[in-house]
Image: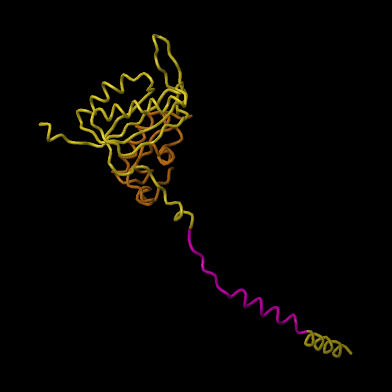
Chain colours: A yellow, B orange
Amino acid sequence: MTEDSKEMQVYELGYHILPTVVADDLEGEVGKLRSAIEKRGGSFIAEGTPEIVSLAYPMFVNYGGKQTKYERAHFGWMKFEMDREQAVALREEDLSRNSLLLRYTLFKTTREETRAQLQTEQSTILREVKTTGILEKKHEAEEGGEVSEEALEKTIDELVGEEK
Amino acid sequence: MHRPMTADYFSQHGIKYVDYKDVDVLKRFLNPHGRIKPRTQTGLTAKHQRDVTRAIKRAREMGLLAYIMK
């Protein structure tokens, strides 16, 4: 393969930075990752700023024979375009040697936004209900019967007259 | 006995890609023990089932999802 025919591929890097890195130094550490990508000819597409997350299980790191347990980390991600050979070099020379990265993943992806954007508006409306005026009309007819007091007195008089 | 989901979740919601960072979506396809549900239970297309499996494995590796629950 010649240099001109280099195939650019979109990659995503997801990373956990140690929780011991304070918020002020976090931007500097992310800047180091960015500069490592740019140094290898990578062009950025999208980025998710790191935020502290609780890990689903504790991760252990061995420092000189002593294991340190981490239950939280700063999770961030970045999507970029890079040549395949450079991506391999990035993983082996930059990412794997970075002692402040608790864990990382680098994989091929697509240029488009891959996060799910759920259509909540449609799902909230279960079905439309049509109403009819049948019940109201029936109710009005009943009310009309109650109002006619003259008719009521007339029927009472008739009943009293029948008894006499 | 498990009742299978009626239709493909991703087609229903217009989701084109399955992302390992969408943990809440991925949790739908795990059983209470944290194991990936089979296609007979998820009702997904073969492609989406493969995508979900890949995304769950990435999320587990990154500590966003547990390997075992309970």
B44 or A45: nearer the eye?
A45
For the stretch drawn in magenta, the main secondary structure is: helix
Outermost residue toward the left in this view = A2
Answer left or right for A26 relative to A80.
Answer: right
Residue drawn at 79 percent across, 84 percent down: A149
Question: In the depicted view, which residue is nearer to us: A63 or A48?
Answer: A48
Numbered range of the magenta stretch: A126-148
Instruction: Determine whether, in the image, residue A46 is placed left or right of residue B34.
Output: left
The residue that appears at 69% across and 78% down in the rendered structure is A142
Residue A125 is situated, as x and y percent measured from the top left of the image, at 48, 58
Quarter assignment of residue A122? bottom left
Q: Position of residue A21 (x, y in %)?
A: 44, 22
Answer above or below: position of A164 versus A43.
below
Residue that protrudes farthest toward the top in the picture: A65
Vertical order, A110 against A146 (above or below): above
Residue pictured at 29% horizontal, 36% vertical: A44
A110 lies left or right of A101: left
Q: Is residue A143 left or right of residue B8?
A: right
Using the rendered view, name the quadrant where residue A74 is placed.
top left
Q: Is residue A147 magenta?
A: yes
Is A155 one of the magenta-colored residues?
Answer: no
